[in-house]
Image (spheres, grey):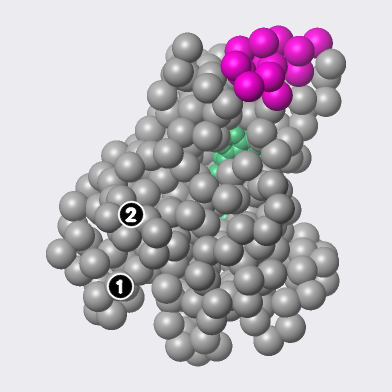
Amino acid sequence: MGHLAYGVDGKVFVVTGASRGIGLEIAKQLLDQNARVVICGRKPEGLAAAAEALKGGDNLLAVAAHIAKEDDVNALFDQTLETFGTVDALINNVGMNIVTGTVDADLGLWQKIVDSNLNGTFLCARKAGQIMREKQQGKIVSITSIAARRAAPFMGVYGIAKAGIEMMTQVLAQELAPFNVQVNAVAPCMVRTKFSEPFWSNPDIHEQIVKTIPLGRIAEPADVAHPTLFLCSSAADFITGQTLVVDGGATAV
Ligand SMILES: NC(=O)c1ccc[n+]([C@@H]2O[C@H](COP(=O)([O-])OP(=O)(O)OC[C@H]3O[C@@H](n4cnc5c(N)ncnc54)[C@H](OP(=O)(O)O)[C@@H]3O)[C@@H](O)[C@H]2O)c1
C-alpha cells in the first residue's frame, strides 16, 4: 500500500485494544507519522510486548485497562491528559467474541460479550466525547464488523453488540456535531489477526470465506488501519455518523 500521510503529526490518539492485531497496526502507522499515541489492553505482558515492538519513545503511553470497567477508563483518560494534555482522536478498537449460539446463550456469557464490545465502547466514547465537546474538535472512530449487518453463525451476540455500536455512532454524531466532533465507524470482514485465527488458519474454512469476498482474499490489518486513519484526518471533516464497510465487497453482492 506504500506510505500514505494523514496529517496526524503531534495529534493525540487513544487506541483501545492495541496490544496486537488491528489496534497494533493502527498504533504503528500513527507513530510512524509522528502522532502521540496511547494504547491499552487488559494484559500488562501483552501491552509491554507491544510497547517494545512499537518503539514509540516519548510519543507512546501504554496503560493497562479493561474498557468495560469505569475506573479503568477514567484512569486511561486521566493518564492521557496528564501525559499529553489533550485527546484529539479516539479509536474504539476493542472487540471480542465468545463462540456461541444466541437462543441458548446464558446471561453471563451475553453480558461478557456486550460488556467488552458495547458497554466498553460507550464508556470510552463518553469520556472522549466530553473532552472533545469542551475543545470543540475531535474524531471518534469505532471498529465494528459486518456481523453487525448480516447474521453470522456463532457470532450472534457479538453482532448484536456491534450493531449497537453502529447506532451509537449515529447518536453520538448527532449530539456532537454542533461541537465539531465527527463520529464514524469502520466495519471489516474477516481480518488476519489472532481474533479470527481459528477460521483463517483452517484451509477449508478459509476457502469458504474467501469465496464470499469478491476481491478474493480476507483483509489484512493495514486494510482496516488506512480507512480508520482517513476518518480521523481533516480530509473527513464533513463525514459523520457513517459506517465505512471494509469487506472486499462481501456485503455488496
Ligand atoms: N479479526 C477479524 O476478523 C475482525 C473482523 C471484523 C471486526 N473485527 C474487530 O476489529 C477489532 C480489532 O480486532 P482484532 O482482530 O485486532 O482482535 P485481537 O487480535 O483479538 O486484539 C484485540 C485487542 O483488544 C484487547 N482487548 C480485548 N478485550 C479488551 C477489553 N475488554 N479491554 C481492553 N482491551 C481489550 C486485546 O488485549 P488483551 O487481551 O490484553 O485485553 C487486544 O489488544 C475488534 O473490534 C474486532 O471486533 C475483527
Q: Quadrant of residue 31?
A: bottom right
Query: Gap between marks 2 and 1, in whole Å?
Result: 11 Å
Q: Which of 235 and 26 is in front in this view?
A: 235
Can you give x and y, in whole percent of width and height, for residue 131 in the image?
32, 75
Direction from residue 35 to residue 210 in the image, left or right: right
Q: Quadrant of residue 190?
A: top right
Q: How crowded is mark 1: few (under 14 residues within 10 Å), some or many (20 or more)?
A: some
Q: Is 241 contained in the magenta span? A: no
In this picture, is 200 found above or below 68?
Answer: above
Looking at this view, name the residue that lies furthest to the left.
178
Q: In which quarter of the image is residue 162?
A: top left
For the point 80% across and 11% down, the residue is 204
Q: Is 207 contained in the magenta span? A: yes
Q: Can residue 103 be seen in this view?
A: yes
Can you give x and y, in whole percent of width and height, for residue 216 in the image?
68, 19
Q: Mark 2 points at which residue?
A: 183
Q: Which amino acid does label 2 sit on?
A: Val
Direction from residue 115 to residue 207 in the image, left or right: right
Q: Which amino acid does label 1 sit on?
A: Gln
Which contiguous range is marked in magenta? 204-217
Q: Name the residue under label 1.
A: 137
For the point 54% across and 19% down, the residue is 250
Can you give x and y, in whole percent of width and height, for residue 156 in the image?
49, 22
Q: Would you say the beta carbon of the disc 2 residue lies within 8 angstroms of ligand 1?
A: no
In this picture, is 165 found above or below 157?
Answer: below
For the point 19% across and 52% down, the residue is 174
Q: Is residue 76 visible?
A: no
Q: Specify which label sits upstream in the sequence, 2 or 1.
A: 1
Q: Would you say the beta carbon of the disc 1 residue lies within 8 angstroms of ligand 1?
A: no
SS of the residue under disc 2: strand
Q: Nearer the viewer, residue 72 or 161?
A: 161
SS of the residue under disc 1: loop
